[in-house]
Image (cartoon, coloured by chain):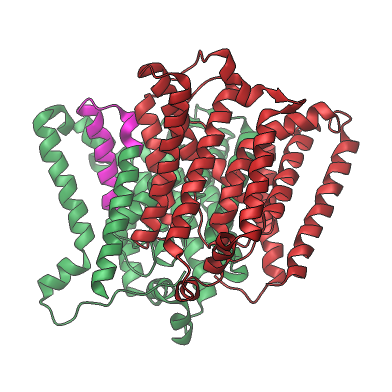
Amino acid sequence: MTVEASPAPLGRSAFQRFIGGYGQEIVVFLSIVFLFIVVGAINPRFLSDTNINSIFAGNAYIAVAAIGMSMIIIAGHIDVSVGALIGVIATIAGTLAVSGYPVWVAWTVPVLFSIVVNGLVGALVAYTRIPSIVVTLGMLSILKGGLISATAGAWISDMPPEFMIAQMRPFGIPSAVYFMVILTIIASLFIRYTDFGRSIYAVGGNMEAARAAGINPERTVVGVFALHGFFAGIAGILFATQLQVIQSTVPPNLELTVITASVIGGVSILGGTGTVIGSTLAAILFACIGSALIFLNVSAYWLRAVLGLMILATVLADMARRRRAK
Amino acid sequence: MTLSRLLRHETILAVLTVIALIVLASLSDKFFTTENLLNQGRLMSEVGLVALAMTFVIVTGGIDLSVGSILGLTAILLGVFWKNLGLPLPAAIALAMLCGTFAGWVNGYIITRFNVPALIATLATLALYRGLAEGISQARSVRGYPEWFFFFGQGEVLGVPFQLWLLGIATVIAAVVLGLTPFGRATYAIGANETAARFSGIRVNATKLWIYSAAGFLSALAAVVFVSRVTTTRSDMGTGLELDVITGVVLGGTSIFGGRGTIIGTVLGLILIQALKNGLALSGVKGDGTIVVIGLVLIGAILVGALFDKNRGG
């Protein structure tokens, strides 16, 4: 895939630069505010504590997974196996927890597993130059088939209460929300201000130019996939502990939701640009839309069509913006 | 691209397929019976029809992830047109197939008109078309089709399943078009170097539009066969079909980077996969275990291809 990084706007005021740099994020943020006002006006129960709680806490794992996915897409790659991976991680974590292992083992082992698996995927992508779509399509069927043949989709329940990290509420706020916010902040500082973070943009913008600038693109790609594995691992733990039961199957369409969050959050599908704040906002936006459909009495079966339209609209807008920038 | 190299890949694949058939036949005495083989052909047809079009798509350097969703959407529309709108079934079939073809054309239009990478465009329409199928059907299935309709999926002509005839005819047409016509040469040229093809006066966008529309049409045809075979319409039909299709095409030696591939290779790839699925099932491996094997075969096949062909990059 040939890629051109969009030129940074120069010679503008700080405010214009801010709008230019975070345009998509601002749009997504305003959409969330708009939805809350409109849907809240039509049906005030939309603004109830329970609903707001379920929007934020119930979807934090998607936002966390979208952080890693954004980095993957910024680096010019894609991972369609993330949903299957989260299903596998949740099942491993739940199984360890009910088998009497200490809670910290049930939390960390699946995350390490996730980092290793995705690191291997990254190595395959980086060193053999097989497109990431093909490798991760293969991984998707390996993880999905492996999970279902190992567990037959059985339910895991009766997990020890101290294992349920997503349900803990320090200072009255669900811990999943802390994870989402803190990881988003750390990741956006990391990707903006560290050498490795900036090399992700460089590799996604133009691989050969990155190499000429002294970056080892292969190592960066492996690193990005491993990092993505870390975030997917955390997402898997949050997913495993947010309800009282884990169904050991692949959550349907999760990869699509995660990719959509990244793309709508402003990560260009051609690589090289985007931020992780945008993807977190977009994950919240989806949760709001999904919830709003219910409160407006629209069948939830239309949700995926809405997501598809939103990806399409965002991608087309991205292409138009690039054409203008040239 | 040399002819000898193409022949080599397909020869290897043919030998592999024969070996797989022999091994599987020795593992289970049910495998190599006419009944089983024809039945497997029946099961292979839906993936096969779509794979023919997908070969063209991938040869141009593109990809179409939305084929499974188009299949699902067409199936739902067929049911809705017939049951809810009360159209006669033949008209419902024709109209649904028209919609499926149009869905494919929309893919091509987005890709050519707006320069959106095929991967992303069809990822979006994968969600959109499946979402439309779910929204229109509201997860309700349609059944109770008349008896004659089941001919497409269950009937036989001269002792061979109807859809296998369909697949055979479509294969011959696809092979002739890709191998022997200017259209086929344009397809290869676009995949090898799109800019060069454009400068050589090849109508790149028109060619791609035809190809993505054909992918929509064949997915829609597969939907009719599918509905007829399983006698009911559900919105989750064809989920994950794209994986099976792409695996078959890539295993058949079509380069995922474009510019290279043949219909014969695709057919061999499909036969190998179907034989593995069926053979493993007969030897006691559960359905989900075979998905793992398909994933491994996909990665393995491309890995081998990449090792033999180090000079090409993404």
User: Where on the picture, by quarter, is residue B288?
Assistant: top right
Residue at (48% x, 43% y) in the render: B216
Vertical relation: A151 (above or below) B66: above
Q: Main secondary structure of the magenta part?
A: helix
Seen from the viewer's position, the closer of residues A160 and B226 is B226
Which quadrant of the rendered structure holds the C terminus of chain A? Answer: bottom left
Colour of chain A, in one word, is green
Q: Is residue A282 magenta?
A: yes
Q: Is residue B6 above or below residue B30?
A: below
Name, please, the residue furthest toward the front: B181
| Image-based side of B288 in relation to A9, left or right | right
Chain B, hue in figure: red
Residue at (54% x, 29% y) in the render: B224
Which residue lies at the image location 38% right of the left edge and 25% below the top edge?
B137
> Which percent across, then down, holds residue B65?
49, 48
Residue in the foreground of this view, choosing between B208 and B232: B208
Q: Is residue A264 visible?
A: yes
Residue B243: image location, x then y, percent: 58, 46
